[in-house]
Image (tube, rainbow, N blue to C red):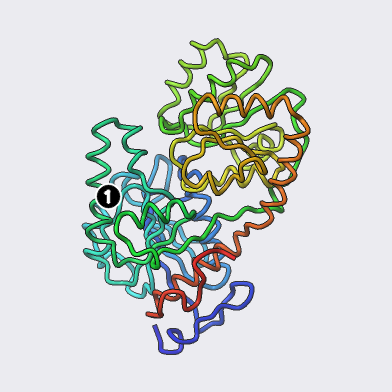
């Protein structure tokens, strides 16, 4: 990077940059937004990357492949290189090392999604690590006691031993606290909340039938069975489940065992148009997940005027304002009661929907992308932490 680029790197008000201030950003991730299990992580990445490239920066992304994907794609300032799968992209990238990457990378952002790329051991460019949530509990819920060993080997020990001097970005204060507990100084952790497209996600016409929506991956730690238990005690209430994952067969059996086949619909993976329709028609967005870094769906539902009822875990305690934009519960019984109460109380539900929509206006993808880009610029230019950024999105 030239001396001019290193010193004079403030962005214009809209996030755009002058011609001599462009970065070449390397993104390391297990999955990009086209992956069938991209989820909120993929959406977050897409919304940031498409803005950076629009503002004149180059992005090279290394990601895991999936059935039907292509090994290499070029879209203007964006190049995507896919290798192996979500699991094997890590060893493949590490073994190939720096020599397999473009020589003119200015800065790298590593998406730590439960497994690290061990970049402190082999990558020579300035680095930033992005963590949506620490996966320790996720591993245990998905894999039992074996998960404790996997979490330690793949996430906890590498972060503690190798990444303490790395600059981190998280999407919530709760995740920032989790990362700090691994030994990373809190002043090296910035919070950039998710944004939401309030031009796309707007209120629609709710369903005539009381309808709940779960939108997300079908994984054990999402605890969808708790939602089925709540629906079972509310005759006439419908539950739409949108998303896919390896826990689907268990959910299908649970639906049949509870006799809910006529009131629970498994939509599988849905596109953006159907996703919007479901968010608009639902009376409530619901989740019983045990681990969430933030919950982008809660914000998208809020923009549609749909309140969220969720367990009070992780970033959900920030994404949902209890008794204002939705309700948070500490136990399965509280969750069921909260859902039942809001279904029955249309005045409270509508009031929370309006409050949720107003709060969604506070979260901008442009603001999130600008903050994250400034952090990358600080690292690329060797500038002090906070020289271009505050510690949270504005």
In the orientation shown, which residue stands out farthest toward the bottom?
Answer: 3
Q: Is residue 342 above or below residue 382?
A: above
Query: Measuring 53% from the left and 44% from the top, which residue is drawn there?
Result: 316
Query: Measuring 25% from the left and 53% from the top, which residue is drawn there?
Result: 92
Left/right of residue 393 with respect to residue 177 in the rendered view: right
Give the quadrant of the C terminus.
bottom right
Q: Position of residue 153 (x, y in %)?
A: 22, 46
Query: Measuring 49% from the left and 29% from the top, which residue is drawn there?
Result: 331
Give the quadrant of the N terminus.
bottom left
Q: Is residue 144 above or below residue 34?
A: above
Q: Nearer the viewer, residue 221 or 365?
A: 221
Q: Position of residue 155 (x, y in %)?
A: 28, 49
Left/right of residue 107 with respect to residue 124 in the rendered view: right
The residue that mark 1 highlights is 156
Q: Position of residue 393 (x, y in %)?
A: 56, 64
Q: Nearer the viewer, residue 341 or 307?
A: 341
**Total numbered badges shown on the rendered structure:** 1
Query: Measuring 47% from the left and 78% from the top, which residue is drawn there?
Result: 387
Q: Is residue 302 above or below residue 21?
A: above
Q: Quadrant of residue 345?
A: top right
Q: Quadrant of residue 131?
A: bottom left
Q: Position of residue 290 (x, y in %)?
A: 44, 36
- SS label for mark 1: helix
Q: Residues within 10 Å of mark 1 (few under 14, many from 20)?
A: many
């Amino acid at each position: 990077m030239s001396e001019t680029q290193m010193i004079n790197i403030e962005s214009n008000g809209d996030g755009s940059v002058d011609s001599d201030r462009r970065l070449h950003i390397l993104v390391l991730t297990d999955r990009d937004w086209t992956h069938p299990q991209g989820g909120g992580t993929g959406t977050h990445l897409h919304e940031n990357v498409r803005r950076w490239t629009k503002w004149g920066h180059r992005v090279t992304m290394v990601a895991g492949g999936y059935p039907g994907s292509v090994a290499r794609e070029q879209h203007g300032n964006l190049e995507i290189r896919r290798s192996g799968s979500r699991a094997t992209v890590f060893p493949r990238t590490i073994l190939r090392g720096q020599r397999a990457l473009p020589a003119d990378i200015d800065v790298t952002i590593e998406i730590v999604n439960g497994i690290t790329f061990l970049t402190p051991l082999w990558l020579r460019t300035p680095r930033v690590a992005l963590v949506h949530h620490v996966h320790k509990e996720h591993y245990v819920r998905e894999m039992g006691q074996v998960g404790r060993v996997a979490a330690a080997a793949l996430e906890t020990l590498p972060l503690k031993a190798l990444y303490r001097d790395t600059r981190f970005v998280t999407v919530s204060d709760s995740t920032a606290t989790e990362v700090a507990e691994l030994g990373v100084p809190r002043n090296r952790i910035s919070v950039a909340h998710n944004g939401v497209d309030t031009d796309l996600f707007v209120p629609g016409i709710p369903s005539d039938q009381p309808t709940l929506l779960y939108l997300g991956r079908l994984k054990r730690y999402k605890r969808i069975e708790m939602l089925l238990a709540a629906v079972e005690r509310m005759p006439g209430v419908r539950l739409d489940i949108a998303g896919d994952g390896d826990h689907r067969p268990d959910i299908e059996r649970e639906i049949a065992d509870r006799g809910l086949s006529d009131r629970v619909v498994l939509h599988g993976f849905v596109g953006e148009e159907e996703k919007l329709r479901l968010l608009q028609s639902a009376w409530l967005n619901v989740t019983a997940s045990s681990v969430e870094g933030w919950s982008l769906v809660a914000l998208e539902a809020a923009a549609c005027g749909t309140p969220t009822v969720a367990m009070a875990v992780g970033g959900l305690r920030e994404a949902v304002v209890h008794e204002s934009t939705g309700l948070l519960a500490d136990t399965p019984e509280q969750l069921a009661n909260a859902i039942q109460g809001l279904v029955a109380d249309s005045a409270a539900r509508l009031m929370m929907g309006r409050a949720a929509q107003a709060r969604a206006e506070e979260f901008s993808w442009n603001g999130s992308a600008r903050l994250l880009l400034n952090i990358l610029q600080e690292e690329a230019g060797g500038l002090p932490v906070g020289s271009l950024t505050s510690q949270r999105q504005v």
